[in-house]
Image: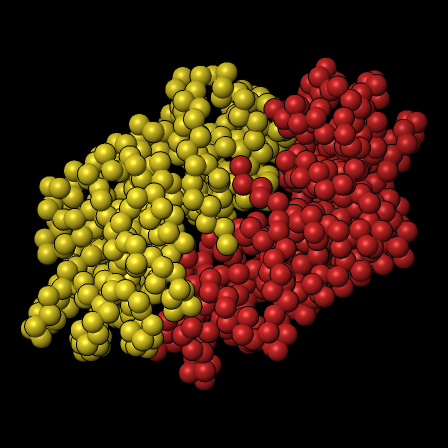
Chain colours: A red, B yellow
Amino acid sequence: MDMDNLRRTSRPTLMLDRRKVLSNIREMANKAGRAGVHFRPHFKTHQSAEIGDWFRTRGIEKITVSSLAMANYFAEHGWDDITVAFPANRLETHLINDLSGRIKLNLLVDHNDTIKYLDERLQHPVALWIKIDVGYGRAGIPWDQPAAVLDTARRIALSSKFNFKGLLTHAGHSYHAASAEEVLSIHRETKRRMIGLRNALEADGFQAEISVGDTPTASLADDFEGIDEIRPGNFVFYDLDQCRIGSCTPEQVAVALACPVVSKYPRRGDILIYGGSVHFSKEFITTADGGRCYGQLVTREEHGWGKPVEGAELYSLSQEHGKLRVTPELFDKIEIGEVLYFLPVHSCLTGNLHRCYVTLEGEPVYRFNSMP
Amino acid sequence: MDMDNLRRTSRPTLMLDRRKVLSNIREMANKAGRAGVHFRPHFKTHQSAEIGDWFRTRGIEKITVSSLAMANYFAEHGWDDITVAFPANRLETHLINDLSGRIKLNLLVDHNDTIKYLDERLQHPVALWIKIDVGYGRAGIPWDQPAAVLDTARRIALSSKFNFKGLLTHAGHSYHAASAEEVLSIHRETKRRMIGLRNALEADGFQAEISVGDTPTASLADDFEGIDEIRPGNFVFYDLDQCRIGSCTPEQVAVALACPVVSKYPRRGDILIYGGSVHFSKEFITTADGGRCYGQLVTREEHGWGKPVEGAELYSLSQEHGKLRVTPELFDKIEIGEVLYFLPVHSCLTGNLHRCYVTLEGEPVYRFNSMP
């Protein structure tokens, strides 16, 4: 999109740098290849059939999603091996039966009651992973309860409805890490805990794969010894939070929200933008001085956007308004009616608020509308 | 919706208690009637043509919205006097010209450059309010700069494109109030500051109305002497944050998110629900112990929902997962596969994440899809 087209962006628009997306995909696919692990990317970040096709060109054939509705969307776009990385929701058994008749569907379980429930109602075989909690404390059987994991594996093995796949985890505590070193430490612990559990299962005669998946460890680690599959998702776009952790550089962030400047307030040194919590989401980063950052101003370049502008952060958002505080020099340069670009804090949530991305060439790239 | 229908809620669903909505509308309309002020409700909270019709039955004919796109949606549903309560965005002049040819369009300005820009490009007359900042610090000319306000009024008067309406403010700092008394104090200050500015304008020969609009002061105050118009929006549903401020009781909250229970973790005492930040939003309330509350569990009743369950709050959300910590007694009672109801922290943002509401009778009530 040339400068004239950029100026036509009259309301908050989620811009997508296709070149950066392709580079992020290529780097992660290459890393998986070097490490000898299967690459089953999580599509919950982009949720776009078109971006899914960009993965296909890198040889990706198996994907991860976060809901059955999203699985159905990608199944309709030709994906036939999908893991729903969310504990199986028994109330959606009708959707499971519908999908598993058409594609290879992989589900997660972490409770024996759910296994019993599904066993009595499934119409087609599904592959089952046991979800393990390696320390994040969200979902899964705790890693330090090997007897419970073994018991669950045995129950799965009793039914012809299930193909037991192995052990799956999401080390989501890596998102709260303060440094790359902390992420790598979480990765080492995750591997150790998962391999320990697999050894316990193997001693009992079970064959089990290990699947892990989070962008910080997948971006920062190189050693995937003992791991069979990785499922990162956020890396396709990255975001400010991943920059903070150290998973990426700002140059790798592939989406930016384009927002019109609507007013200026000299006394406060504030720029008012059209762009609020319904465009960015309310996710924030706590800044060094204890404030909040909801988005980071970046420079405008001939083609797309450039580097972060030091000290120019969105410090407050309401439904449609965003407040940007800048230096007096920058305040004078910014004009009402121009369009500013911001890196989002959490690209998964920002993406979820938009019907489509707009590439730098001005083309729309549509998303699955996951709104219930 | 009977109990069987409730059980069919297989994924996160935003339930709407029509009776409570109608009661909230009636109470606010009655209060405006008693106070002798015009009632121009803000529709950004519900964003639904059908709920708009419920306002019509109370004699409401003029409304407020937060974007031109939303104004267009309601114009298509028969509303012909609409205020866009957001500083006029010059990049959307084409939409302003389109709308102002069909309806009575009222816009906000707080910068002389924008007045000049619009004056040169508008094809039909619009009504202009000067946006005043009474202390919130988001948008508007600061209330303590009467010379600037007067200068802006004069510039508006110079053009035949504009009908000068008066002074409009949003005392959004009332949302950060810690008590009803603090809200009432903000209301008194707001009135004093706005009336002071009007007096300054009148001394210069201008006739100016005063429009104020925020749910906390509109809910808690009774004295609107000197005010011409109120524009509250959130009151139509209310939410946990309004309960915290004291604007409403939990019984008045008219929306609740119905979420399936997908797993239970005895060691942590946690219930895992299908319901995350893409269903609730990331808005939270800081609890007494410094934790976060993203939603409050309420009891299930024969018809709808009941009271908050003490100490049962959603304390963590990720994209699709919600973590609920409960007492050991309640933990044992809650079953995987049942549907729990939660009051949202901020109903405007929660509503924005849903395509429709579902009434307690099981009927969908569709919303404007404001996704860019």
Name the quadrant containing residue A327: bottom left
Tell me if residue B155 comes above or below residue A25 in the rendering. Answer: below
Residue beneath the point at 23% across and 34% down: B57
Expressed as whole percent of the image width and height from the top left, the position of residue A136 reads 67, 44
Q: Name above or below for residue B220 compared with residue B324.
A: below
Q: Is residue A324 above or below residue A60?
A: below
Q: Is residue B354 left or right of residue A365?
A: left
- Residue at image coords 93%, 27%: A205
Left or right: where B36 falls relative to A237:
left
Report the quarter where the N terminus of chain B lies: top left
**Which of the pair A21/B60 is nearer the observer?**
B60
Specify whether residue A127 is in view: yes
Q: What residue lies at 66% left-to-right and 65% top-to-bottom?
A: A17
Across the whole image, how many numbered discs are drawn on residues?
0
Is residue A313 at least partly visible in the picture? no
| Closer to us: B365 or B266 | B365
Instruction: Please name the residue shown 15% across and 68% down the image.
Output: B197
Depicted A354 relative to depicted B138: above or below: above
Query: On the picture, is B200 further left or further right than B101?
Result: left
Q: Quadrant of residue A255?
A: bottom right
Q: Quadrant of residue B319?
A: top right
Q: Which x, y percent locates residue B216?
A: 27, 48
Q: Nearer the viewer, residue A25 or A116?
A: A25
A218 horizontally vs B117: left or right? right
- Residue B121, position in %: x, y? 34, 72
Give the percent coordinates (x, y) of residue B263: 63, 29
